[in-house]
């Protein structure tokens, strides 16, 4: 059995008591789940549409505003992490450079904090400035519930609660998604930048393909 | 054009079926099941309910995600549908004829181009290729398509709509069963595979493919490695020489006094293989694509040696013809809200399904006669490990490990099998009373994708029902435990190198020898036509089926101790980590293997396909 992390039904049935879901049409993967005020609960693939705040102080919904219709890279960090997170972000910065002017047009990076109590929008703003993050790269915070929902939804969990609480275990991988095509893969965040850039392109219908050559 | 119309028609039919199913689900809910029953159906939402939405939008609670729920498939009625018998592909004349490099002409079948690929190695050296320039091939030619077809995993009476799956078909025509190629030593094959997959993936998968012939002694450019994928609108000619290892190096010819007397063959006769399989290997998407159905069987017969002859009255006299049946095990989960095949995209540990399929049907049955059968069992993954047994307590007579004949047939009561391992077994129903039922069952508990718990699964899951029929029957086969099959190859006394492959995790990411996967640089260079000793090392808490492409290895030791008798064999997958053997972990497995005849870049990787897709892989290269 598979851990189901996304909400199964529509909000209408989630009346305070039993919260029984009803299927309201569309595939689960189609993600047409809405709260009473009409906001999607999760998007295609069950990606949570949690409310978040960007490092620029903008209110966003994760699926609707950050993922839907885009090619995305999703990673997790926390600013108090002194050694590994800065290396991760520096690597992503190199990937960012390789994506050139596609950044902010059809490719977007979402770096989510694992420590929202400390990482306010202001702190993330300073962090983003320190790395000179350009357009199309959002550092995201929110309630602990929102960021934990995202962490768990992207599989960064450990069945052992002690290990699960260790933030450093959850930042080694990043997700690459071509959301309109439901194409999702993961790779180590510290993979060399040129490789991550290629992984993004390989899954792009019009992107480059691996060269099949032997070593010289 | 007409194909497109049919596809649209099928899609509409499918949408109608799904809509009808979902209406039904809503009615069930309307009828007021209690919470426990609904939980069983997986239809209960998080318990936090509707919390008030706070003023600051980014800090309001997100009420829907409080509880991690378990997805439970719609129930199925077991043993209603017959086991799908694999569809044997028919050789044909390819149009255009194969060429050494990428074909310059368009496919006469569908107008597709051949994808960019390196030229076939040793093409004209007696392996079927006609010329380096002109088109032509003297071996057998097959043509298949990977296509989207609608497939019912459930019996019709359960009313669960068909799911779109991606699978190998003969000229785009689905048969409801996986395809099978029956190959022979001495007959090279070109398998032309068209990619007809749609971009719309219904939630998971990528419409790019690279078909790996698992355990093939295959030149690199036809290996179907992770980086050799191609897109919709292209085909690729896979070249399978069907030649025994050593044929261009250590053993140009060998002679054996086997079941049919003295025979001389190309290559080392002891390297003869029997049961291979092919599956998609697209980098980072293998688990999704294979789960979606991209699996086929490749049975390699050795008539030339008088060994595994596809005729039970000759050679080793193994059950043959209709009594030789490949079985692909795959556990799946179906979305209870719409009945569709479901894949959890964002799981990093490994994927488990609550429905056990064999050859694409959940819990099928097979009517058997009172005689011997050969089952070629492959665990098609992605992550589950099984302990297989027969419900009547009878033995399997195991004749191969990883599809390679054992030195001697052995009796097995319980067989542990992890992803990509292949065991050929003979099951004897001769003395089972007519009218009785025997089950192929799994008794190993597994609660997450990391590996089995080692505890007994209660109750045991019956996966396949054998219904023993009465009536007259003939059985020309002859095999029992102790029967001599094929001796092991003799490894060179000197190892050219020893290497360690240590699988570890760094901050949740897989690393091999402390290095992350690098698509550009093979981490080891192996000298062609030498032998090496490799040690695979892993920590605890997880089980990893480690797979090495190209030549199979012989397992020397598990944690310094001799491996069990069934693993004194030629293997290409070895289980390491927790519960590698029943009740026993393996920290280190030591193997010896050779690298003969071809050159190229091959991977070593974990065959828990979810781990594989998350870069638990390294490349190595055979160089001169």
Image (cartoon, grey):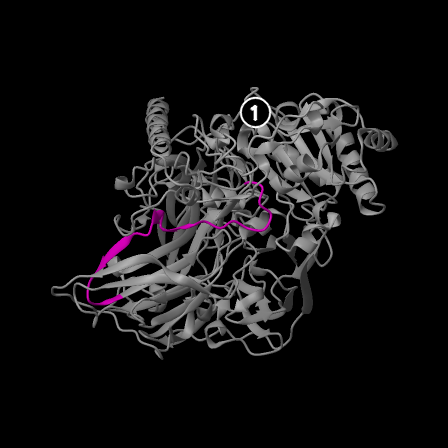
At which x and y percent is residue B295?
42, 47
For the C terminus of chain B, the quadrant is bottom right
| Dominant secondary structure, magenta | loop
Name the one closer to the observer, B63 or B347: B63
Q: Is residue B371 above or below residue A104?
A: below
Q: Per the image, is B359 magenta?
A: yes
Q: Quadrant of residue B72?
A: top left
State yes or no: residue B77 in magenta. Answer: no
Q: Residue furthest front?
A: A17
- Can residue A6 be seen in this snapshot? yes
Task: State which region is magenta.
Answer: B345-372
> Looking at this view, is A50 or B90 the one in front?
A50
Asked if residue B172 lies left or right of residue A212, the reply is: left
Label 1 belongs to which residue? A40
* Residue B190 percent across, percent down from the top left: 43, 46
Frontmost residue, B226 versus A135 = A135
* On screen, residue A125 above or below B322: above
A33 displayed left or right of B398: right
The quarter of the picture where the N terminus of chain B appears is top left
User: Residue B152 at what x, y percent from top left?
Assistant: 33, 40
**Subunit that carries the residue with mark 1:** A
Instruction: Tell me residue A85's x, y (percent).
Output: 80, 43
> Number of numbered discs present?
1
> Of helix, strand and loop, which one carries label 1?
loop
Judge whether A94 appears above or below B436 on screen.
above
Q: Is residue B510 visible?
A: no
| Residue B7, quarter of the rendered image | top left
């Amino acid at each position: 059995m598979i851990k189901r992390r996304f909400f199964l039904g529509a909000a209408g049935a989630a009346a305070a008591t039993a919260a029984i879901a009803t299927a309201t049409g569309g595939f689960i993967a189609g993600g047409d789940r809405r709260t009473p005020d009409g906001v999607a609960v999760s998007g295609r693939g069950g990606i949570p549409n949690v409310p978040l705040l960007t490092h620029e102080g903008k209110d966003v919904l994760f699926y609707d505003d950050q993922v839907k219709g885009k090619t995305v890279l999703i990673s997790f960090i926390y600013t108090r992490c002194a050694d590994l997170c800065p290396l991760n972000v520096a690597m992503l910065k190199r990937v960012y450079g390789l994506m050139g002017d596609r950044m902010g047009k059809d490719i977007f990076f979402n770096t989510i904090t694992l420590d929202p109590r400390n990482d306010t929008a202001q702190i993330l703003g300073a962090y983003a400035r320190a790395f000179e993050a350009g357009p199309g790269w959002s550092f995201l915070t929110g309630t602990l519930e929102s960021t934990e929902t995202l962490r768990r939804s992207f599989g960064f969990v450990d069945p052992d609660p002690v290990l699960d609480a260790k933030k450093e275990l959850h930042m080694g991988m990043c997700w690459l998604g071509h959301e309109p095509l439901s194409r999702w893969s993961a790779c180590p965040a510290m993979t060399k930048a040129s490789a991550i850039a290629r992984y993004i392109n390989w899954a792009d219908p019009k992107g480059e393909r691996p060269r099949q050559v032997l070593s010289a | 054009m007409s194909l497109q119309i049919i596809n649209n028609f099928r899609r509409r039919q499918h949408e109608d079926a799904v809509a009808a199913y979902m209406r039904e689900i809503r009615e069930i809910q309307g009828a007021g099941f209690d919470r426990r029953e609904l939980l069983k159906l997986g239809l209960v939402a998080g318990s936090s309910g509707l919390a008030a939405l706070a003023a600051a939008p980014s800090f309001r609670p997100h009420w829907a995600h409080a509880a991690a729920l378990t997805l439970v498939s719609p129930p199925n009625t077991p043993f209603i549908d017959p086991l799908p018998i694999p569809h044997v592909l028919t050789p044909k004349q390819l149009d255009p004829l194969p060429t050494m490099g990428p074909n310059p002409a368009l496919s006469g079948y569908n107008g597709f181009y051949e994808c960019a690929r390196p030229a076939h190695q040793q093409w004209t050296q007696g392996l079927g290729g006609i010329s380096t320039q002109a088109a032509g091939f003297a071996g057998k030619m097959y043509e298949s398509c990977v296509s989207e077809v609608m497939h019912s995993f459930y019996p019709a009476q359960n009313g669960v709509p068909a799911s779109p799956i991606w699978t190998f078909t003969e000229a785009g025509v689905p048969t409801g069963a996986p395809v099978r190629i029956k190959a022979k030593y001495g007959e090279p094959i070109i398998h032309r595979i068209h990619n007809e997959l749609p971009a719309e993936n219904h939630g998971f998968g990528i419409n790019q493919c690279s078909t790996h012939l698992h355990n093939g002694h295959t030149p690199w450019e036809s290996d179907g490695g992770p980086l050799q994928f191609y897109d919709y609108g292209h085909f690729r000619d896979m070249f399978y020489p069907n030649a025994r290892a050593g044929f261009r190096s250590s053993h140009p010819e060998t002679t054996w006094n086997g079941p049919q007397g003295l025979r001389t063959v190309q290559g080392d006769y002891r390297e003869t293989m029997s049961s291979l399989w092919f599956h998609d290997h697209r980098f980072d998407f293998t688990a999704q694509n294979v789960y979606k159905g991209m699996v086929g069987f490749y049975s390699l017969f050795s008539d030339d040696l008088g060994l595994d002859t596809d005729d039970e009255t000759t050679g080793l006299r193994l059950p043959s013809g209709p009594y030789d049946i490949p079985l692909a095990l795959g556990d799946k989960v179906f979305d209870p809200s719409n009945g569709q095949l479901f894949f959890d995209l964002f799981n990093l540990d490994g994927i488990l399904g609550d429905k056990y399929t064999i050859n694409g049907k959940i819990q099928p049955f097979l009517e058997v006669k009172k005689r011997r059968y050969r089952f070629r069992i492959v665990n098609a993954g992605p992550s589950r490990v099984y302990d297989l047994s027969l419900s009547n307590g009878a033995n399997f007579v195991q004749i191969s490990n990883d599809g390679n004949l054992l030195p001697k047939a052995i009796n097995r009561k319980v067989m542990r099998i992890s992803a990509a391992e292949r065991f050929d077994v003979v099951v004897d129903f001769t003395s089972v009373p007519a009218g009785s039922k025997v089950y192929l069952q799994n008794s190993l508990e597994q609660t997450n994708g990391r590996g089995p718990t080692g505890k007994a699964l209660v109750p045991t899951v019956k996966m396949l029902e054998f219904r023993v029929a009465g009536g007259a029957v003939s059985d020309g086969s002859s095999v029992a435990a102790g029967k001599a099959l094929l001796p092991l190859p003799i490894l060179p006394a000197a190892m050219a190198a020893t290497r360690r492959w240590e699988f570890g995790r760094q901050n949740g990411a897989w690393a091999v020898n402390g290095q992350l996967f690098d698509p550009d640089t093979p981490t080891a260079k192996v000298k062609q036509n030498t032998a090496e000793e490799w040690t695979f090392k892993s920590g605890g808490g997880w089980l990893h089926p480690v797979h090495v492409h190209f030549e199979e290895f012989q397992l020397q030791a598990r944690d310094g101790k001799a491996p069990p008798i069934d693993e004194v064999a030629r293997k290409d997958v070895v289980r390491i980590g927790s519960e590698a053997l029943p009740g026993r972990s393996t920290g280190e497995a030591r193997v010896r293997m050779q690298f003969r005849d071809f050159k190229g870049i091959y991977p070593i990787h974990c065959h828990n396909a979810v781990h594989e897709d998350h870069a638990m892989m390294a490349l190595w290269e055979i160089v001169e």
